[in-house]
Image (spheres, helix red, strand yellow):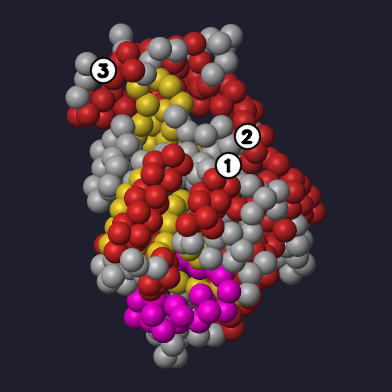
Amino acid sequence: LIHQTALNALSKYGCGSCGPRGFYGTIDAHLEIEDTMSSFLQTEGAVLYSDGASAVTSTVAAFAKRGDLLIVDEGVNEALLTGVSLSRANVRYFRHNDVKDLRRLLEKVRANDIALKRKPTDQRRFLVVEGLYRNWGTLAPLKEIVALKEEFHYRLILDDSQAMGTLGENGRGTLEHFGLSPMVHAEIVTFSLENAFGSIGGMTVGNEEVVDHQRLSGAGYCFSASSPPFLCKVGVASVRRIQGKLNHANHTNNAAAHETEEELSGQLLLKRLTQNTTKIYATLTDSSHPHALKLRNRLVITSHPLSPLIYLRLSDEEATSRTRGEQTLIMDKIAGRCFLEAGVAIVSTGGHVKKYLQLVPEPCLRITANVSQEEDDIEALVRALGDAVQSVFK
């Protein structure tokens, strides 16, 4: 149905939209996805960017300027760091997901304020984190971060690209997962449409002030051609599917297809993703599974159990005596064998997840859980991975 939505929109609108949003590039499809997303996330407004990375980058740079202060988790992704750099603000980094180190840094800034007789309100200050970290698969301790934000009077910029549509009871991301709300606990929430929503582009949501400010100050909004209308329609359809509201009429006459799609929408869709993620974790760590046993003392999972991005690195025993290049080569060989010998696609990250980062993760294998995976697929994954590890470590 998502595919058919795209085809219908292409027939109606054509492909391109011919200009930036503020000039002659805004049409009804752009306004529809902004209204749909702000309603879904229960915010006052939303602003659409035509590229996922530029949405994140432009959002940070639109609000933080020279003289402002950004307190940033050192594990954030490349797009956030580009926005941090373009802002020209003063930047301090805290250790990845380390709330104690964050408090230490905030107290140091406060002590400096006292010494300089400066009020916290004399400088715009932001905490910058991801909800679910793209390069780590770790989950930010948002409740603790929000508590510190409020205690020290900062604003929170949250990149929720990986969690939006995958976490939370209704798929509203890490804020919902922790019982928090946009605008109230995170003033600025930005995310890509290129993951769970199956489209291209990105969005930022918040109150009217946050949204309207970007229409004049968001570089990716002002100077980029607007998103093709059919991609907006895909985004709207994806939101409605997550909500269980996708209309099947005028899409297909195949009753069996209707039934399959209905089974994978709304709460059932989110439940299936959670089940598959849990099943992959459980199978990989099952000490009684013959192929999972081949991973023991070789690979360890480093991502959060709820993360659909599953990361495995070499165990300390295997990594200690090896350089980063040697570890990367091992991971490349494992991923290559999985694909060539079993047709299972696993990503080796060591060769490309290393540039433009404040903190470079160890070489890993990345597995992505999705709703289309069946139990046989998960068994095939673990079998292929176990056989590849056994072969590489011979």
The answer to which of 122 and 381 lies nearer the viewer is 122
Task: Please state which amino acid type lies under the numbered disc 3.
Answer: Thr
* Disc sitting over residue 370 in the figure: 1
- Residue 174 relative to residue 50: left or right: right
Q: Residues within 10 Å of mark 3 (few under 14, many from 20)?
A: few
Disc 1 to disc 2, how far (Cα)? 7 Å
Q: Are marks 1 and 3 in contact (CB under 8 Å)?
A: no
> At which x and y percent is residue 25?
45, 85
Q: Is residue 210 magenta?
A: yes
Q: Is residue 332 magenta?
A: no
Is disc 3 placed on a helix, strand or loop? Answer: loop
Is disc 2 placed on a helix, strand or loop? Answer: helix
Magenta span dominant secondary structure: helix
The answer to which of 362 and 61 lies nearer the viewer is 61
Q: Which residue is mark 3?
A: 320
**From which residue to which does the magenta span run?**
201-223
Disc 2 to disc 3, how far (Cα)? 32 Å
Task: Please state which amino acid type lies under the numbered disc 1.
Answer: Asn
> At which x and y percent is residue 155?
48, 63
In this view of the protein, can residue 65 be seen by the observer?
A: yes
In the image, what residue occupies the spot 26% across and 42% down? 354
